[in-house]
Each structure stands twice: as structure tokens, then as C-alpha cells.
Amino acid sequence: MAAKPKKTAATETHQSIEEQTAAFLKAGGKIEQIDRGITGQQNIAGPRHIVLGKPSSDNAR
């Protein structure tokens, strides 16, 4: 008798994602296509200004 293939973490993750996606779609969810290169992350921190060296009158706050 052939042994069952062992489930790996990748296999379980793939199956879990597939099941979650199916449940989402069945519940009326919609998958939105996002263009390549677009990110959902927002840069709320803003630019960072770093001054190296001893403080002088030119770069003192």
C-alpha cells in the first residue's frame, strides 16, 4: 500500500489560502485587480532629515 504524501507547510498554506479565497468569493466578496508596481502602503512618516557632525550655527534648530 502506498503511503500518503506528507503535507508540508507550503501545501497547507496553499490549501488554506485557496479555501479562504473560495469562502470570500462565496460570501459575495470581490477580487480587485491592482496594476503592477502599485502598493497599498502609505508613507505617513514623511521625509527624514539627518544631520551628521557637530551642531553649528548653520544647522542648529
Image (cartoon, rainbow, N blue to C red):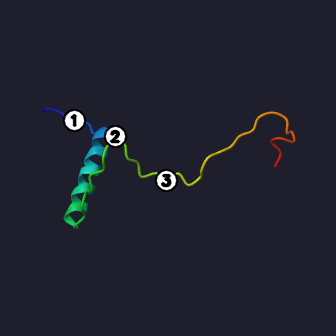
Circle 2 — which element?
helix
Label 1 sits on residue: 5
Label 3 sits on residue: 42
Q: Nearer the viewer, residue 40 or 9?
A: 40
Task: Indicate which disc residue 9 carries.
Answer: 2
Mark 1 vs mark 2: in front: 2
Circle 1 — which element?
loop
Amino acid type of the residue tagged 1 in the rendering: Pro
- Label located before the other in sequence (3 or 1): 1
**How many residues crowd mark 3 within 10 Å: few (<14), some (14–19), many (20+)?**
few
Q: Mark 1 and mark 2 in contact? Answer it, CB < 8 Å.
A: no
Asked which quadrant contains residue 56, the reply is: top right
- Residue occupying image coordinates x 18% and y 34%: 3
Q: Vertical placement of 27 versus 22: above or below?
A: below
Q: Point out residue 59 in the picture as x, y percentages from the top left corner.
A: 80, 42
21 on left or right of 53: left
- Residue occupying image coordinates x 21% and y 57%: 22
Amino acid type of the residue tagged 3 in the rendering: Gln
Mark 2 vs mark 3: in front: 3
Task: Indicate which disc residue 26 carries.
Answer: none
